[in-house]
Image (cartoon, rainbow, N blue to C red):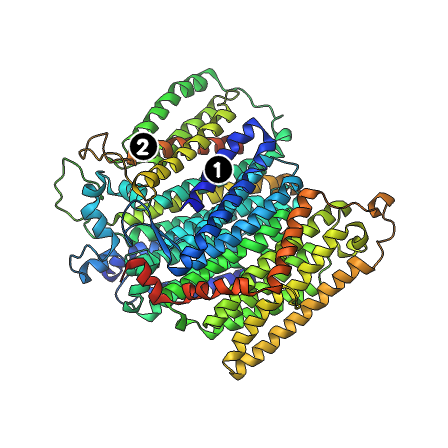
Amino acid sequence: MRRALSLIVLLVLAVGLASALRGPSVGAEARRASLIDDDEVNFGRRYNSRAVEETGASNVVASVLVTYRGLDTLGEVTVLFVAATGLAALLHTGRRRRSEREATPASLIVFTGCRFLFPLILLFGAYIFAHGHLTPGGGFQGGAIIASGFLLIYLGCRGRQPESKRLSAVESLAGLAFVLIGLIGLAVGGSFLLNFLPEGSPYALLSAGIIPVVYVFIGFKVGSELGGIVGDLSGAR
Amino acid sequence: MSFLAGYVQYIGSFGLVLIGLYIVLVKTNLIKVILGINLIDTGVNLFLVSVGYIRMGTAPIFSQAEAAGREMVDPVPQALVLTAIVIGVSVVALALSVAIRLYEHYGTLNLCKIRELKW
Amino acid sequence: MLLIAAPLGLAFITPLLGLLSERLTRYVPAAAMAFNFTLGLLLLPRVLREPWIVETAGLRPPFSIHLVAGPLGVGLSLLIALVGLLVSIYAIGYVREGPVAKYHTLYLLLLVGATGMVLSADLFNLFVFFEILCISSYALVGYRGDRAGIESSAKYLVQGAIGSSLILLGIGFVYGLFGTLSMADIARNVDSVTPMKVFISMAFLITGFGVEAAVLPLNAWLPDAHSSAPSSISAILSGIAIKAGLYAVARVVFTIYGADTMPMLVLLVGILTLLVGEMSAFSQNNIKRLLAYSSIGQIGLIVFALGLASASGVQGALFLVVSHALAKALLFLSVGYMIYRTGSMEISSLYGMGRRMPVSSLCFTIGAFSLVGLPPFIGFAAKFTVIRAALAGAAPLLTALVAIVLLGTVVEGAYFFRIVQGLHFRPPPEGAAPEQTDQYEAPVSALVPICLLAAIIVAVGLYPGVLTKYLGPAAMDLLDKAAYIHHVLGV
């Protein structure tokens, strides 16, 4: 009964989706044909053609994320913060029972291997978010890599874990820094998240105004946040 | 089948969404439902990225080595998808923590048995 | 802009503060909302004349994300700040167990999400702030960690996640069709695409936002979630969160697609929701589930008012939003301590509360009467505006629907009168221990917001002109597509 109903719903949905694509189709490909080279008309073309001169970053996606749609990125960072806090709050009350479980300590090879790899992973993650404005990557990707380093520690080196208080302090401070950067832009130039640092020359590491700075903070925040989530879920905190 | 060539990405993404929706509606294990939510998110993100695709386009990154000869794909859907992926991960993480607590209370993850709140 | 950034910054510091001293974190949301409220009051006169477009990253619209602080946006942020402030004062004393610092962080972020939603002028930005709202509410519903709370949180989460994916699907279609995400820009280009595609993308967006707004087929999560959450959260959810979902639907439909595409279906859905909500509430024994079903009913009424698609209809809808937010928050807050004292949510255990907790019972009565729509309270003015707007057209179908609305109001009156009568005139149940029947009022931190809410309900009820002066421009903000495009794009 339930299966039949849900199949009917899915069928209706599929028909709806298919009919939405009939005729001139959806997407940039279709629009490329129909529109002449007009920068003012849609986002994609305008950003591609003007991003380097307006923001100085070679990675157009980075400039879109931090400058043109910076408020969305701030919101996204907030969503992750909400989820991490909510997760910690929900798992808080059952914690006492769970932490009494004994875990077998890892063998020497695994333990040493994890300890060896952990700083390398952190370094790689930092490289990704520091170069976010030049190469594919950026704050979120770098932060996720850092979090996987934390995951390695939780899995491989049982019994040793990062300080949970330090992680949440880093998380809060990094988030605050992002907001403050935006507010400084507001104070200096009159609009939130204005690019107020000098743009420098493209392809150089210190270029693109506030984009690398914001990415560094996002990297710290996401890394510590996801690390905290992983720790909460594994019952270690 | 060449008329489908332009539509492959849409068929793929909508297919993922529909499969995910089927799982959420029909399956009774909460972990499977959470995986279904993840599938729906993946399908929607795939759809969003494919909206910005231009045939023979290249990644929207300038680099010294490559002359700006080919046209670049639209960077905005990529930024949107970054945000959407993070939001999806947050929802799934929260869902998993709810599942952990639910298991502690009820001892099972079967949604048919977790029906204490009735009318 | 500061309306969003300041509370957000405070929200990020809250866990740090929590490490230092947990007692301090209880005051943070109250301080943030007080700031928002004063800022909103200062902004309101200015934006009544001309909406203030705030851009980010120094680029003119539509190429950057921008916020529109128009009469509707600032008015709704004022409402959010006011209700948020009062409920957070209540929560200072009410939330005692569990990780309190995290509760306040989540609570503040919920309000940040709501404020961001009403001020945003960009479709994807609307979605992001909507997600902030939703995810904090998923976590807060399950905050107490008991069986009912976690179960409701799970169901709410699954349904909400599907809704969010549908919204994203709709946004994907919109971007693919129009190449832009700024709502004004989309509004300008809407006619250049076939109606079928417009309809499909609108359907996805409405369905997705409708899950949070709890319109008829999508509201299965609401009774559980609102009744199992801690009372301060129930107040915020019923008062603010569902209104935010409804605002998103209204903004998408009116501003992007234009008022004349509002189908008759919306009116019918509104009426059906109203009937289902009120009928279900009537047969409830659990006071919080009853209030939750009553919220569903009121949302149906607001949807009906929006469906009229006329200036007075939208004004009535906004008036209802304000009055319901105030009244429902008042009801949940006053009931909160009653439940805490008796330890049970059954209505029969609330009998005789009039003697034990006189102030709370009086305020509950005021809230109930306002919701039903009795004269000296704000609810009366709100419902009257809606009914007058519906009858203005003099179409026979509308008159029939108005009759159904009145029927719903009668049902509402019936169950609320039953409760009020039980509160004041029935003796406490047998077998209640003596210390439970003595006079033992709720603490001051709870009484202050309850009495303030009651006072506002009475004051605005007596002088509705104070509010209606702002409702006109706010309604036009929502309805007038051309003016919106003109303000944002300068076209």
User: Are the two marked residues, 1 and 2, in contact with CB atoms closer than 8 angstroms?
Assistant: no
* Mark 1 to mark 2 CA distance (whole Å): 21 Å
Quadrant of the image occupied by residue A27:
bottom left
Q: Label 1 marks which chain's residue?
A: C
Q: Quick one: label 1, few (<14), some, or many (20+) residues within 10 Å? A: many
Residue C302 seen anywhere in this rendered image of the structure = yes
Residue C369 percent across, percent down from the top left = 68, 63
**Label of residue C10 in the image:** 1
Asked if residue A19 lies left or right of residue A39, the reply is: right
* Numbered disc 1: secondary structure: helix
Q: Amino acid at mark 1?
A: Leu
Asked if residue C287 lies left or right of residue C71, the reply is: right
Q: Nearer the viewer, residue A197 or A68?
A: A197
**Label of residue A213 in the image:** 2
Q: Quick one: label 2, few (<14), some, or many (20+) residues within 10 Å? A: some
Mark in front: 1 vs 2: 1
In the rendered view, tell whether residue B48 sits above or below residue C89: below
In the rendered view, tell whether residue C140 sits above or below residue A11: above
**Label of residue A76 in the image:** none
Residue A78 percent across, percent down from the top left = 44, 41
Quarter that holds the N terminus of chain B:
bottom left
Residue C20 percent across, percent down from the top left = 55, 26
Q: Nearer the viewer, residue C202 or C97?
A: C97
Q: Amino acid at mark 2?
A: Val
Q: Label 2 marks which chain's residue?
A: A
Quarter that holds the C terminus of chain B:
bottom right
